[in-house]
Amino acid sequence: MNISTENVESVTVVRLEGNLDTNTSSQAQDRLNQLIEGGASKILVNFADVDFVSSAGLRILLATAKKLTGSGGNLRISNLNETVAEVFEISGFSTILNVFGSEQEALQGF
Amino acid sequence: MNRLGSIAIRQPESVLEARKKIRLVTEAVTGDSLIATRLATVTSELARRMARENTSARIEVSIDDSQRGRVLSVDFVGQEHCPDAALLTSFFDDVETDGTNTVRGVLSLPGDLLLDDARLATLEAIVQQKGRDELMAEIQAKNLELQESLDNLRRTRSAKERMESELNIGRDIQMSMLPLSFPAFPDRREFDVHAALYPAREVGGDFYDLFLIDSDHFCFCVGDVSGKGVPAALFMAVTKTLIKSRAANDLSPASILSHVNTELSQRNESCMFVTVFLAILQTRTGEMVYANAGHNPPYVQRGAGGLVRLDQRHGPVIGAMEGIAYREDDTKLEPGDLVFLYTDGVTEAMNPASHLYSETRLQEVLTQNRCSVAKNAVDLGVEDVWRFQADADQADDITVMAVIYSGAAPEAALHELELRIENRLEEIDRVNATFNGFAERNELPAKLRRKLNLVFDELLNNIVSYAYDDESEHTIAIHIRLYDDRLTVMITDDGKPFNPFERQTPDVGLSVEDRPIGGLGVHLVRSVMDTATYERHGGNNVVRLEKRIDPDEQN
């Protein structure tokens, strides 16, 4: 999976491309951990180019959210396709994570 | 006064026969099976006492026009002792006794009861039906004649041995007429049928049959010929043959029974008759049309729960009177419904204390147990009778049949994809890539494709990570079938037995801090699919999934 990052003011925007599943999650996890260790405390993950997310992907999002809230930071999510949004809904992640429609909305007041 | 006949009470068998006759006659004139069963029960109880106290006793049955209107009179006539009238009072409308040797039970009949000559003939045929001991005496006499005329030197064979051999011939005829090989239709997935017949020590007249009329009509029936011995066996053979030949081009149970009745009634000097329940199941739709000619009402165990007694009567017993037009009813069997048929050998089986097995007990067994295989239902019924009967003699043939409707046979898939992968996580990508190609070729909606991607990721991850205790290579098979209206997936692995769907639904309402990591995958699979089932089959874990395709969904 391709992962690119961009700093927008104090927020680190992470753009994922591919699927967030069994075989790609550890790669995404490593990258997110790297960013946190490098001092990032506000992370926005943009899912615009993610086809589907499985529980392995949800797991690393949850781990990242826990890490950030533990150190006074925050995780935001944006641009879910319909299927991924449904998975967030079913799993309850839509209520425990901060999900936004677009990157712009997510950046506001972050 | 219309005297219907006399029933001699001598042997324990004649008590059972009296019971059956009183039940059939009472039901014929009242149309009420409950009253008929009650009268039959008290009759058999009193008859049993009379048989103990008298060397010779009898029951006289007649229909009279008295001051209280038309009545059914049952006279219990003792020889040495007067029968005990007290027993009858709560069963009959009136009880009269002459104080010497006769007690009469009187039952009021409906005023509009049709009682023409033909009807009377039917009732007389029921009452005067020859009993087991009378038939035995006849057979014995015939055998003696035969023996004398054949060879005086062969007298070493006793009349009794002769009779036994004739009874054996009768039983051979009876058993050779039955389909005994099960599964009877191994290539038919729409239904499962099983039947068993246990003949009484002496030959009885039970029979059953099951056959396909055409590719989607399955006919099954259970019957009981009155009387015993070779004549009953031959009558049964004729009945069964007539039913099958008529059914070959007649899909109406009512019509089949009407024709068979006319054939049998025309030349029936021995006045035998037969009770029959016959049904035809349309195997694609589950529609079942049935007709009951004086037989014990079968039961339908609904797969969704509930027990239904098919208690409609569609005409009298077969063979007693020409020209009867039988009726029929229908019901729809849903997949999982079970039809349970039996003969009165079940409900009238006796335990050592001379109590009857009874329909109540049968109902309890059918209420408390469910079977998904027809053979198990038959075994269940029969074994409960054996348990009840204990070491008492089996007085009558015992026959049980079960038919389970499983639903229409699956139609052929439009497109299929079969994949075999090794138990490595990287293989999941290959599955999803191959499936995406399949989805694209068949223009599946993107939403559906993504859901299947998710499902493969979750389930294959589970299998690869947790199913194997060894380090060796295993194969996981994935079979995808696309139909008009749905997509199905079957995943098979040879790992240790594990039902993923037994896991509890995780608490998805917990906050980020309280939320344990993991346990979600199977929940997601169950949520995005319409059905998800697990079975252990031949040393494999088999997971089956189904997702309906919404024809309007293009995204």
Image (cartoon, helix red, strand yellow):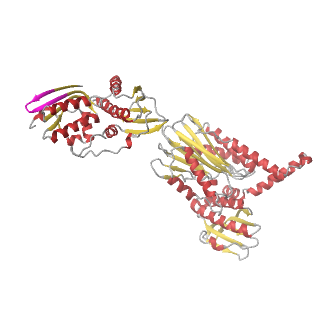
Q: In this view, does A77 lie above or below B400?
A: above
The x, y position of residue A3, in whole percent, is 20, 26
Farthest-out residue, front = B471
Would residue A46 be seen by someone viewing this image from the given angle? no
Which residue is pictured at 27% across the width and 40% down the height? B517
Q: Quadrant of the C terminus of chain B?
A: top left
Can residue B21 be seen here? The reply is yes
Q: Magenta residues, as a range?
A: A5-15
Displayed quadrant of residue B504: top left
The location of residue B42, given as percent across then percent down, is: 63, 66
The vertical placement of A74 against B159, above or below, is above
**Residue B47 percent coordinates (x, y):** 69, 66
User: In the image shown, does B381 or B38 lie closer to the viewer?
Assistant: B381
Q: In this view, does A46 lie to the left or right of B256?
A: left
Residue in front for this viewpoint, B498 or B4: B498
Q: In which quarter of the image is residue B9?
A: bottom right
Predominant SS of the magenta segment: strand
Locate the N terminus of chain B and report the quarter of the image it occupies. bottom right
- The answer to whether residue B424 is left or right of residue A12 is right
- Which residue in the rendered view is the most extreme toward the bottom? B99
Question: Would you identify the image quadrant in which residue B461 lies?
Answer: top left
Q: x, y percentage for residue B25?
A: 65, 59
Whether the magenta-drawn stretch holds residue B449 is answered as no
Residue drawn at (19%, 32%) of the image: A32
Q: Does the magenta stretch include residue A11?
A: yes
